[in-house]
Amino acid sequence: MRGASWEPVAVLLAVVVAGVLLLHALGFAARSEREPLATGPFSGGLEPREHPVSRFHVRWYPVTMIFLAFDMEMLFMYPWTKVVGEVGAPAVVEMFLFLGILLAGVGYAWREGAFRWT
């Protein structure tokens, strides 16, 4: 039995290395000097309290997770409404199990204070 040919692997490795080097060269060539952003009144006409590209406060992350939980609920409920008539009771049981898991997550977030704004 003949040994494996390593030429395709070497060609692929050369293409990957050349691609990475090309991307680094393009990034170096397209780099621009950064200047501080000038902030001024925007929507309400008031001076901004923080920088426009500043990070969000940590209290928004639990709210985001709760939003994603309800978003996933809707993502699964729309197709479920189309097949529940064909599948019957097992589809209803599965949906209530899914909603129970989401409700447990919301209960945990409530217990941890994700809904308190103080």
Image: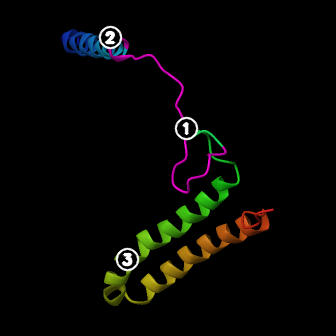
Residue at the spot of label 1:
39
- Of the residues tagged 1 and 2, which is closer to the observer? 1
| x then y, percent, for residue 20 | 33, 15
Cα–Cα span, label 1 and label 2 = 33 Å
Residue 25: mark: 2
Amino acid, disc 3: Tyr
Residue at the spot of label 3:
78
| Residue at 38% from the left image edge and 79% from the top image edge | 80
What secondary structure is marked by label 3? helix
Which circle's residue, 1 or 3, is located before the other in the chain? 1
Q: Look at the picture and state if 14 lies above or below 104.
A: above
| Residue at 49% from the left image edge and 78% from the top image edge | 94
| x then y, percent, for residue 84 | 37, 85
Of 46 and 67, nearer the camera is 46
Q: Magenta span has 44?
A: yes
Are the residues flagged by discs 1 and 2 in contact, CB closer than 8 Å? no
Of 38 and 84, nearer the camera is 38
Which circle's residue, 1 or 2, is located before the other in the chain? 2
Give the image quarter of residue 2.
Answer: top left
Label 3 Cα neighbours within 10 Å, binned few <14 / some 14-19 / many ≥20:
few
Amino acid, disc 2: Ala
Which circle's residue, 3 or 2, is located before the other in the chain? 2
| x then y, percent, for residue 5 | 20, 11
Of 60 and 11, nearer the camera is 60
Name the quarter where the C terminus is drawn. Answer: bottom right
Label 1 Cα neighbours within 10 Å, binned few <14 / some 14-19 / many ≥20:
few
What span is colored magenta in the figure? Answer: 28-49
Q: Look at the picture and state if 96 lies above or below 6.
A: below
Label 2 Cα neighbours within 10 Å, binned few <14 / some 14-19 / many ≥20:
few
| Residue at 32% from the left image edge and 82% from the top image edge | 83
- Of the residues tagged 3 and 2, which is closer to the observer? 2
Of 7 and 62, nearer the camera is 62
